[in-house]
Amino acid sequence: MNTVFFSFIAILSLFIFFNLGKVKASQKQRNRNDRVQWGKRPWQGQKANNVSEQRDGTKIIDVTPEDVENKSEKE
């Protein structure tokens, strides 16, 4: 009885997985300026801009501990 029950669940799960696999993200989600560049390695190319602006207009500045240490030494 357990084998039949778990087989039914496995078949149902595969059916749902393959049908939901056809669903795509919307155009708005796919074409954004702040998308993650999965094909680009972070240690290659230009240094990324470390200031990001949120939807409400606030800005977030990413700094590394080295940046903070260097700034405190300069002052």
Image: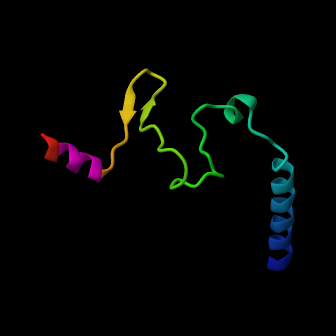
The residue positioned 59% from the left and 44% from the top of the image is 36
Residue 2 screen position, x and y as percent: 80, 78
- Quarter of the image that includes the C terminus: top left
* Left or right: 32, with 55 as reference point: right
Residue 31 highlighted magenta (yes or no): no
Residue 30 screen position, x and y as percent: 70, 35
Residue 40 screen position, x and y as percent: 61, 51
The residue positioned 75% from the left and 30% from the top of the image is 27
Q: Please say which color scheme the image uses.
A: rainbow
Q: Could you tell me what secondary structure mostly forms the magenta stretch? A: helix
* Left or right: 24, with 63 as reference point: right
Q: Nearer the viewer, residue 65 or 1?
A: 65
Seen in the picture, residue 8 relative to 60 is either above or below; the reply is below
The residue positioned 81% from the left and 48% from the top of the image is 20
Seen in the picture, residue 71 relative to 57 is either above or below; the reply is below
Q: Nearer the viewer, residue 56 or 17?
A: 56
Q: Nearer the viewer, residue 44 or 50?
A: 44
- Quarter of the image that includes the N terminus: bottom right
Seen in the picture, residue 4 relative to 62 is either above or below; the reply is below
* Left or right: 27, with 71 as reference point: right
Residue 22 screen position, x and y as percent: 85, 46
**Residue that protrudes farthest toward the left in the picture:** 75
**Residue that protrudes farthest toward the top in the picture:** 57
The residue positioned 39% from the left and 24% from the top of the image is 58
Q: How many marks?
A: 0
Quadrant location of residue 59?
A: top left
Residue 70 highlighted magenta (yes or no): yes
Q: What's drawn in magenta, residue-wise?
A: 66-72
Q: Nearer the viewer, residue 62 or 21?
A: 62
